[in-house]
Image (cartoon, helix red, strand yellow):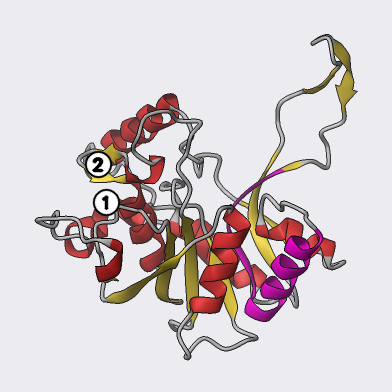
Amino acid sequence: MTGSIWAIVPAAGRGTRFGGSTPKQYLHAAGQPLMAYTLAALAAHPAVAGILVAIAADDGDWPGWTAVQSKPVLTCLGGATRAASVLAGLLALPDSARADDFVLVHDAARPNLALADLDRLLEIGRGDPVGAILAAPVRDTLKRAGDDGGIDGTEPRERLWRALTPQLFRRHQLIRGLTEASAAGVDVTDEAMAMERLGLRPLLVEGAEDNFKVTTPADLARFEFELVNRDAGPGTRDPESAHPQSSVFASAFPGPRSRVPGPEEI
């Protein structure tokens, strides 16, 4: 697959559930911000042409990256919600991105994406007229709670999936879906929800359980643990499901910048 797909990373949120003043996407794991691993995972795939990151207007933590593995990294101002940031990114893509091109959308704080999962998503999703998302089947027993905190019942889990990212859709369809949801006052929590509102049915592509979003300190500790074990030595990685973040990290991000640029310099 040639480099023809742009990836959008909404990163304008503050991550209030995590606590602290630093947005979670900039928290460090093994000495580097989480988003560095996220961008490295996306850039490692040959089909990805570049990455556009939607950041907050007052973002003083953005390191000013302009390329990852020789692939361009662009920025735009995000919005007050995830959906608004994704829409801003879709509209800010370079002229080389066509209306009917597929685009990827991936969480900034989901750094553990495996190359095999991304490859499978692109292969299956680009063969569908709508697109696809990475997802994981629900394996736990689900309980429905009452207002008093008691259990009102048990929900069948056989056809339930947890939505992950990346999610893959055609640019013009996703713009329409997000625009119409916004006009209706609907806060869509992922891109697939916007497509569903259009009457479309994206495909579910099973992804690895360890493609988790960092939302708590325990998640951050888990990711750091996986980094340590991944790099423990030769023979510890399955080449078919390898995470590219470690092997490409030194060349993709040669080192920290001496200062953080202001928004007007990005």
Question: Callout 2: 10 Å neighbours few (<14), some, many (20+)?
Answer: few
In space, the residues marked 2 and 1 are separated at their CA atoms by 7 Å
Q: Are marks 2 and 1 in contact (CB under 8 Å)?
A: yes
Mark 1 neighbour density, 10 Å: few (under 14) some (14–19) many (20 or more): some
Query: Element under label 2?
Result: loop
Q: Nearer the viewer, residue 124 or 129?
A: 129
Q: Position of residue 185 (x, y in %)?
A: 78, 56
Q: Which SS class for mark 1?
A: helix
| Residue bearing the label numbered 2 | 231
In screen coordinates, is 39 left or right of 82? Answer: left
Residue occupying the point 55% across, 45% down? 208
Look at 48% across and 48% down and name the residue there.
Answer: 13
Q: Residue furthest right?
A: 153
Residue 34 seen in render: yes
Residue beneath disc 1: 246
Q: How many marks?
A: 2
* Left or right of 193 in this view: 48: left
Amino acid type of disc 2? Asp
Task: State which region is magenta.
Answer: 162-184
Q: Residue furthest left?
A: 258
Q: In the figure, residue 144 lies in which quadrant?
A: top right
